């Protein structure tokens, strides 16, 4: 059991570093976009949110691939299992149950899910922060331009 916890914690830590890196890239880009005035004020908040969401989705997909590589390295699933699919099902807590880990690696599934829940929570917090900043910037820009700035 200890080796499962060690492997799962190591992969989770790597994914936290990966998510932090993406956050450190996404935040300055969102700030720069917010400072640049929108050419289409009504589409501006949606554009910032779509871009931020797509970057975060890419990070999550990369994190799923990290888990699938870990599964392959330790041989955690049956030979005929699609490891990316297995990692996605665990990471998103979907839990179909059509692929199950080998008995000696049973804890990796729940650890993958725990990592996914934490990373999705982090992404949700980041999206909310970007939304608040974007709405505030949008309101400031539209009021400077003589618009009401109301949503």
Image: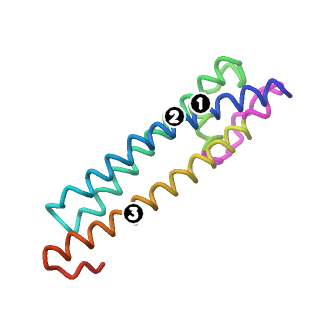
> Residue 76: x percent and y percent?
72, 24
The residue located at (56%, 28%) in the rendering is 66
Q: Is residue 150 magenta?
A: no
Residue density around tag 3, few if under 14, some if 14–19, many if 20 or more, within 10 Å: some
Residue 96 picture quarter: top right
Residue sitting nearer the eye, 45 or 31: 31
- Horizontal placement of 119 versus 36: left or right? right
Q: Main secondary structure of the magenta part?
A: loop
In the picture of the structure, the residue carrying the numbered disc 1 is 14
Q: Which mark is residue 18?
A: 2
Query: What secondary structure is marked by label 2?
Result: helix
> Where's the C terminus, which quadrant?
bottom left
What's the distance in space between the residues labelled 1 and 3, CA to CA? Answer: 27 Å
How far is disc 3 from disc 2 in space, using C-alphas? 22 Å
Q: Is residue 105 magenta?
A: yes
Return the x and y of residue 92 as percentages of the image width and height: 60, 46
Circle 3 sits on which residue?
131
N-term-proximal mark, 3 vs 2: 2
Vertical placement of 43 versus 51: above or below?
Answer: below
Image coords of residue 121 (percent x, y)? 58, 53
Q: Residue at x 73, y 33 (%)?
A: 108
Magenta region: 92-108
Name the residue: 51% across, 56% down. Answer: 124
Circles 1 and 2 in contact, beta carbons < 8 Å: yes
- Tell me residue 130's x, y (percent): 40, 58
Q: Secondary structure at mark 3?
A: helix
Between 42 and 74, which is closer to the camera in this rendering?
42
- Quadrant holding the N terminus: top right
Q: Residues within 10 Å of mark 2 (few under 14, many from 20)?
A: some
129 with respect to 146 (left or right): right
């Amino acid at each position: 059991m200890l080796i499962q916890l060690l492997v799962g914690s190591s992969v989770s830590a790597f994914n936290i570093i990966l998510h932090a890196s993406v956050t450190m890239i996404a935040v300055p880009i969102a700030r720069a976009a917010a400072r640049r005035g929108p050419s289409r004020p009504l589409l501006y908040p949606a554009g910032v949110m779509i871009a931020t969401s797509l970057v975060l989705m890419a990070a999550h997909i990369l994190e799923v691939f990290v888990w699938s590589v870990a599964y392959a390295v330790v041989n955690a699933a049956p030979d005929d299992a699609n490891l990316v699919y297995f990692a996605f099902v665990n990471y998103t807590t979907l839990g179909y149950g059509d692929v199950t880990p080998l008995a000696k690696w049973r804890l990796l599934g729940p650890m993958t899910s725990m990592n996914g829940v934490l990373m999705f929570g982090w992404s949700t917090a980041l999206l909310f922060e970007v939304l608040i900043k974007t709405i505030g910037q949008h309101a400031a820009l539209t009021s400077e331009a003589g618009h009401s700035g109301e949503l």
